[in-house]
Image (tube, rainbow, N blue to C red):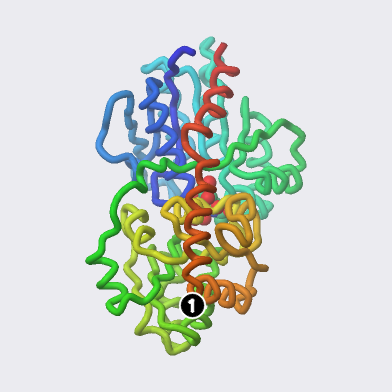
Amino acid sequence: MKNLRIGFVCYPTFGGSGVVATELGKALADKGHELHFITYSAPARMGSLKKNLYYHEVRVSDYPLFDYQPYELVLASKMVEVAKTHDLDLLHVHYAIPHASAAITARDILAKEGINLPIVTTLHGTDITLLGKDPAFEPVIAHAINESNAVTAVSHSLKSDTLELFGVDREIEVIHNFICPSHFERDADEQFRRSAAPNGEPIITHISNFRPVKRVKDVVDVFAAVRSKQPAKLLLVGDGPERSRAEKRAEDRGVRADVVSIGKIKNPIEPLLVSDLFLLPSETESFGLSALEALAAGVPVVASDAGGLPEVVEHGVSGYLAAVGDVEAMGRHAHALLDNPDQHAAFRAAAQARVQEFHVMKILPHYEAIYHRLTP
Ligand code: GMT
């Protein structure tokens, strides 16, 4: 199969979609494709530049006339420029808005010059399940989905939400998110473990951007339920609007002394390697990449039975699922697992076996097949 020149557009932040896009781009570059990231800052997980990997910054000027700078239009112009300068074969954009809609504008401009630039759009969730519910965005998102040359969704759940919410009638291919197991093949930082849990207490971890959809209050309540039965520590990783509220909740529940809230860090693998259990009680989660990363680190997951989470966590095998908001059930499951070393070890092994299904080398060919279909 021929190597391709691919433009990648994503949010360069720590969010799951940016992580997936960046790791996919890096894996494709390793296989010999030429990858051009087009975004407003270098993706967080990009690391140092390496062979076949390029970054093109989208700069929005500070024009005083605009109260809101038109990022989407500057992005579209940049896509046109990079596509022409680097002779791109296709664009793979992560998120319907503004990335797919900007890509469609770029494709239309290029078509006038006789240049064909197919667009692959990957839907990650919040563009559909949260933004998509806002009528202000609905027509643009539906247009972006309908006009892309190929559309993928990161879970079956997200695919059916998309079809239902937008009434679109087109092929959407489900390609699950993935992990690179080699990233997890390292020793846990024992010094960090001792500092978080000086007396060898089990560590329960939550990693997110602390937005309301993550229900971080439930994380604290589940932890408080466990803590009422046994010693344990809660490790909170990440930052966002709900972080201080979660810390306050821990104070109100009398468990603040057992909560270690370390904030945003570059690589969530380190805290996962010292963890015994991962909590993800989200309101909804199109996939739950952090849950998959926890499983890859051999950490069983207790999560809500929502969105794509059941496609990742097998209830009673590598973790437990409970109804959104059912902190009593989540607390019961968490305590039962931590209290039973044999069962915990079995869940750890099942978690590591489970993630083989999501190995990057298994998932990546599905994207490549789409690319080759669009660039015969
Ligand atoms: O919700 C987040 O943590 C960030 C968000 C994003 O856009 O990066 O994550 C979404 O995409 C991830 C990667 O595909 C999924 O694993 C997350 O489940 C999804 N978030 C939601 O659906 C709430």
- Location of residue 207 in the rendering, given as x and y in whole percent from the top left corner: 43, 62
Amino acid at circle 1: Phe
Q: Nearer the viewer, residue 225 or 67?
A: 225
Q: Nearer the viewer, residue 88 or 263?
A: 263
Q: Nearer the viewer, residue 249 or 146?
A: 249
SS category of the residue bearing label 1: helix
- Location of residue 145 in the rendering, given as x and y in whole percent from the top left corner: 65, 35
Q: Quadrant of residue 141?
A: top right
Q: Residue at x 63, y 73 (%)?
A: 325
Q: Residue at x 37, y 26 (%)?
A: 29
Is 81 left or right of 105, judged from the image as shown? left
- Location of residue 197 in the rendering, given as x and y in whole percent from the top left corner: 31, 75
Check the image and name the residue furthest to the front.
342
Give the vertical position of 172 relative to 133 (above or below): above
Q: Nearer the viewer, residue 84 or 282?
A: 282
Is 103 left or right of 134, judged from the image as shown? left
Give the vertical position of 84 relative to 153 (above or below): above
Whether residue 70 can be seen here: no
Q: Which residue is mark 1?
A: 223
- Location of residue 136 in the rendering, given as x and y in whole percent from the top left corner: 65, 51
Whether residue 204 can be seen here: yes
Q: Residue at x 31, y 53 (%)?
A: 266
Quadrant of the image containing the C terminus: top right
The mark total stands at 1
User: Would you say the beta carbon of the disc 1 residue lies within 8 angstroms of ligand 1?
Assistant: no
Label 1: how many residues lie within 10 Å, few (<14), some (14-19) or many (20+)? Answer: many
Q: Residue at x 39, y 64 (%)?
A: 275
